Amino acid sequence: MRNRLLMSAFALGAAAVLPACGSTSTPASTTSTVMADKSTPMADTTTAMPDKSGTPAAMTKGAYLSYADYQSSMATRQGTKVVLFFHAPWCPDCRATESALNASGVPDGLTVVNVDYDTSTELKSRYGITQQHTFVQIDPNGGQVKKWTGTKDGVAIKAQTA
């Protein structure tokens, strides 16, 4: 009986949140510091070969990383535009975007960081996140550059960046 009640409560909560998978764009300029959270590890697609300018490709090669992996490799990602992707595993739009990022990759010059929407309450508060499938471009100090929702793949994410 208790399990049935818990499952009903979970289903109602998920149903109330799923319609939040929407599409809006809100530029902002606030400063903050990025804090650690729990996230699923992603594949890092970086390499160490230098590009034409002599900058190591690890600084410009596109990557899709977990938040924990990004925290440990921030210095090597400074040469890219960093976008936090507030992802929920139960969100169909989030899953579609993640599949596209894994299948098609991330364009050079972009780092997409998977942030767990369900557990990252401090980051959600810091960046004013009210729904999953939200993207926040941050500067090297963790300040918000731009915020939007609804992007479906790496090329579209990069096109949204400032």
Image (cartoon, rainbow, N blue to C red):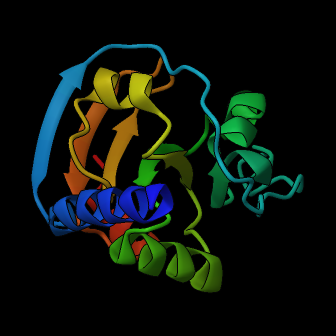
What x and y, as percent, mark residue 22?
15, 66
Nearest to the observer: residue 8 or residue 101: 8
- Percent position of residue 54, x then y: 79, 45
Q: Nearer the viewer, residue 20 or 135?
A: 20
Residue drawn at (22%, 58%), measured in percent from left and top? 17
Q: How many marks?
A: 0
Left or right of 87? Residue 159 is: left
Q: Is residue 65 above or below residue 144?
A: below
Q: Residue at x 61, y 24 (%)?
A: 36
On screen, residue 44 above or below 54: below
In the figure, is residue 145 to the left or right of 86? left
Left/right placement of residue 29 relative to residue 89 reads left
Task: Determine whether 37 is above or below 70 in the image.
Answer: above
Residue 133 percent location from the top left of the image: 32, 59
User: For residue 104, what is the image quadrant?
Assistant: bottom right
Q: Is residue 70 visible?
A: yes
Q: Residue furthest top?
A: 32
Q: Residue furthest right?
A: 48
Q: Nearer the viewer, residue 79 or 39?
A: 39
Image coordinates of residue 50 in percent, x first then y, are 84, 52
The answer, for residue 158, to whether it is visible in the render is no
Residue at far bottom of view: 103
Identify the image quadrant of residue 88. bottom left
What residue do we see at 31% from left, 14% from top?
31
In the figure, is residue 25 to the left or right of 18?
A: left
Q: Quadrant of the N terminus?
A: bottom left
- Of 106 and 116, nearer the camera is 116
Q: Which residue is found at the position 17% from the left and 60% from the top?
A: 16
